[in-house]
């Protein structure tokens, strides 16, 4: 066999291995490289003061548990104080933190007039904020034509303006110290769009534009980093709490969670992103990850595929079953 043929075979084998790895990937390639070769959260994130919004359930709750094990001081915010107290108790049970290391700070992201006072309360308690994790938010399950404008306003007020407002309160402190991490839990729907979530997609697209713009303004402060975390479907209360046609209505049930990524895996990858100051990460199982790459690099194909899948999603929704259920029956139910 000639050397050229041997080299070509090796190249083909390498390509096949990479393809297989991609088919099994649950994050973008930069993130998975950082997981393999990058800095560990256990080295980078200890002794920090981390403020997590949306800490009363789902991704934020799991983040509180994993961060508490790293020994950080935590500020837990959301509207439901009793749920935050529950999360705090579990953090204390499962880590070496003491009661004084965790501040429960109830906060409504839509009440922007309260954000300055809340920021002062954190600074008074801990003297600094090393990481702000903008995680609180709600999704949407309703068709545009049936949806009141108030729902669109609520999604923008909460997901976009609430997050911008809190960031603006914390930023002067980070600029004074010339260091800090601003981490925002965005979504794959921050750059893709699907039916039944037009207002949610708009709010997450707006967030991505804002934080990418902010990062360029902070170029003279290399110690301050801005990260957009974009998960695909993750097990949490997001569907249950999703807004529907009216601002007073939410979906009220979890739908099918079996095909979604477990929250602990999503949060582990988030911590790796934070430890490595990655500017944007995609955290998702297949096939969403491949669709995300299509949206980024081949939008014409992405529009076509999303319209095809979207039809099924709308049909499911109209017939009262979980909007996403049917096109996942072919995939392994790994988290059920
Ligand atoms: N799960 C997914 O599939 C997925 C995918 C992509 C992105 N995300 C994003 O991940 C983030 C966390 O969502 P999740 O999946 O963990 O859902 P979740 O379980 O419903 O958690 C949402 C959190 O946001 C808080 N929140 C809602 N409205 C608020 C308000 N007005 N003020 C302050 N906090 C508020 C909730 O607490 P209270 O009700 O106590 O206020 C709760 O702690 C969201 O930004 C979501 O868009 C989730």
Image: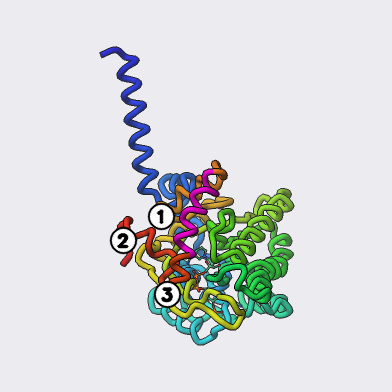
- Callout 2 secondary element: loop
Q: Which residues are magenta?
A: 301-314
Q: Main secondary structure of the magenta part?
A: helix
Q: How far apart, in angstroms, are the residues tagged by discs 2 and 1?
A: 10 Å
Residue 182: x and y in percent read 62, 61
Where, quadrant-wise, is the C terminus in this rendering?
bottom left
- Local crowd at mark 1 within 10 Å, few (<14), some, or many (≥20)? many
Q: Which sits in the foreground, 301 or 315?
A: 315
Q: In the picture shown, does residue 24 fall above or below 127?
A: above
Q: Which sits in the foreground, 92 or 248?
A: 248
Residue 273: x and y in percent read 51, 54
Q: Quadrant of residue 224?
A: bottom right
Where, quadrant-wise, is the N terminus in this rendering?
top left
Cβ atoms under marks 2 and 1 closer than 8 Å: yes
Residue 41: x and y in percent read 46, 57
Disc 2: which residue: 334
Say whether residue 141 is magenta: no
Q: In the picture shown, does residue 297 fall above or below 242?
A: above
Disc 1: which residue: 285
Q: In the picture shown, does residue 287 fall above or below 199?
A: above
Disc 3: which residue: 254
Label 3 or label 2, whichever lies nearer to me, is 3
- Local crowd at mark 3 within 10 Å, few (<14), some, or many (≥20)? some
Question: Which residue does the image show at 39% across and 63% down from the upper left?
Answer: 260
Question: Which residue does the image show at 46% across and 45% down from the upper left?
Answer: 29
- Callout 3 secondary element: loop
Q: How far apart, in angstroms, are the residues tagged by discs 3 and 2?
A: 17 Å
């Amino acid at each position: 066999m000639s050397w050229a043929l041997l080299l070509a075979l090796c190249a083909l084998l390498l390509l096949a291995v990479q393809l297989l790895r991609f088919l099994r990937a649950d994050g973008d390639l930069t993130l998975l490289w950082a997981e393999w070769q990058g800095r560990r959260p256990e080295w980078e994130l200890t002794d920090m003061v981390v403020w997590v919004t949306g800490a009363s359930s789902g991704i934020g709750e799991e983040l509180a548990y994993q961060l508490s094990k790293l020994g950080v001081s935590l500020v837990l915010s959301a509207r439901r104080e009793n749920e935050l107290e529950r999360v705090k108790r579990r953090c204390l049970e499962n880590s070496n933190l003491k009661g004084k290391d965790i501040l429960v700070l109830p906060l409504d992201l839509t009440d922007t007039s309260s954000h300055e006072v809340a920021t002062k309360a954190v600074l008074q308690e801990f003297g600094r904020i090393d990481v702000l994790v903008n995680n609180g938010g709600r999704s949407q399950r309703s068709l545009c034509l049936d949806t009141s404008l108030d729902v669109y306003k609520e999604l923008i007020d909460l997901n976009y303006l609430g997050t911008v407002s809190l960031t603006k309160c914390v930023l002067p402190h980070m600029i004074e110290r010339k260091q800090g991490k601003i981490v925002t839990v965005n979504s794959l729907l921050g750059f893709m769009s699907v039916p039944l979530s037009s207002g949610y997609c708009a709010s997450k697209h707006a967030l991505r534009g804002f934080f990418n713009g902010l990062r360029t303004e902070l170029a003279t402060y290399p110690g301050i980093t801005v990260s957009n975390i974009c998960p695909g479907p993750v097990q949490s209360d997001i569907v249950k709490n999703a807004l529907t046609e009216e601002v007073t209505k939410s979906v009220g049930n979890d739908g099918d969670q079996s095909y979604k990524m477990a929250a602990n895996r999503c949060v582990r990858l988030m911590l790796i992103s934070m430890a490595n100051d990655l500017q944007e990460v995609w955290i998702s199982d297949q096939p969403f990850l491949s669709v995300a790459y299509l949206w980024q690099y081949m939008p014409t194909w992405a529009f076509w595929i999303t319209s095809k899948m979207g039809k099924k999603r709308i049909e499911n929704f109209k017939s009262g079953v979980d909007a996403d259920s049917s096109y996942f029956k072919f995939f392994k139910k790994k988290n059920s």
